Amino acid sequence: MDISAPYKRIKEELAQIEQLLADPNVTSDQNRYRELSVRHSELSPAAAMYDEYDAALREVEEAQALLAEAEDDEMREYLKSESEVAAAKAEDLHHRLLLELVPKDPMDQKNAIMEIRAGTGGEEAAIFAGDLYTMYSRYAERTRRKVEVMSANPSEMGGYKEIIFSIEGKGAYGALRHESGVHRVQRVPETEAAGRIHTSAATVAVLPEVEDVDIEINPADLKMETFRAGGPGGQHMQKNETAVRITHVPTGIQAASSDQRSQLQNRENAMKFLRARIYEEQRARREAEQSAARREQVGGGDRSEKIRTYNYPQDRLTDHRIGLTMHNLPSLMVGEIDDLITALQEADQARRLDLAAHG
């Protein structure tokens, strides 16, 4: 795939921006100056990489031209080696430049809202849902992102029948979007006296946190209900109706929040989750209309798809979508999943690159 034309346009735009940034009329407008500076920082790395690629191509040409004229065997061997090194560098840069041209999802930079629900397996499934929450929350903490529980329905043995939480920090959705789907665990439950291995499952949904500008919702289409949040009982039982449930009447989509102390905070959280759900439903419908093949993408969000198995007896995690097997489950389950996330992102990039290259 020829990449010279798009990168020529990038360099032209970069030159225009640099000219504008030197204009006193532009520098006096802080908003305009900031906007141009951000765009400049977005384009500069790609332009610099293309210059490096162009230089590597020239090195190949020069080495091959000298090789054709060289008579000394030792010199020919040296020039051949130089040509091969430059060619390998040019090939690597070409691949990376192609990836830069793949359209990026603007939602990737957003905060993430995650929903984990216990599936088949009873109490063990709820415990596994809790384990997944620990894995994601510890990962978020390690990457300096903030975790906030929006709604939780604990189980009797310390797990969760359902937990919804936000992860705030740049790129949270882009990092975790491929976690959507059914996660399966194979292990001996603590309650299993006979030592038999059980298989349980939990469902994970990952949504981008969307703002009012990202999606338009008519307030007249919303139905809000309040109710008492569940508590430990006795003197700590909620006497006021602080919990909130909001229903988007046209679609029937609901979102609730009960973990905050005030009705206002719960309403804000419920609205945040509702916007994310409606946005995701609209996006899924658009994508289904555009291409059935889109459903097959890595992390496509199909919640009926078994995407991963956590096998405790064999200390093995297997992601079925990309055929990746990793070991050391104890480390993975406390949030050390950086390599897993990178592998999924690279697989998705490769898929999108193939689509871009072949139309």
Image: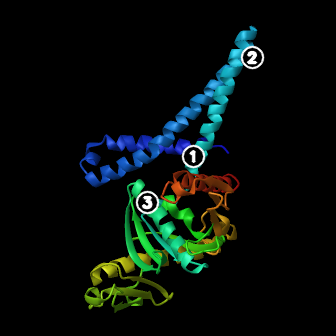
- Pick whichever, 96 or 336, lies toward us: 336
Q: Tell me the crowding category of disc 1: few under 14, some 14 to 19, or many 20 or more residues within 10 angstroms, Cα based.
A: few
Figure coloring: rainbow
Left or right: where 322 falls relative to 178 = right
Q: Secondary structure at mark 1?
A: helix
Q: At 30% across and 78% down in the image, what residue appears?
A: 265
Residue reaching furthest to the top:
72
* Residue type (three-letter) at the residue carrying disc 3: Arg
Q: At 66% across and 71% down in the image, what residue appears?
A: 196
Q: At 31% across and 40% down in the image, what residue appears?
A: 22
Q: Tell me the crowding category of disc 2: few under 14, some 14 to 19, or many 20 or more residues within 10 angstroms, Cα based.
A: few
Residue 141 falls in image quadrant: bottom left
Residue 328 drawn at (x, y percent):
58, 53
Residue 61 drawn at (x, y percent):
67, 24
Q: Nearer the viewer, mark 3 or mark 1?
A: 3
Disc 2: which residue: 68
* Residue type (three-letter) at the residue carrying disc 1: Pro
- Number of the label disc, if any, that sits on residue 6: 1
How far apart are the two marked residues, 3 and 2, measured between alpha carbons? 59 Å
Mark 3 or mark 1: name the one nearer the start of the chain: 1
Mark 2 or mark 1: name the one nearer the start of the chain: 1
Disc 3: which residue: 138
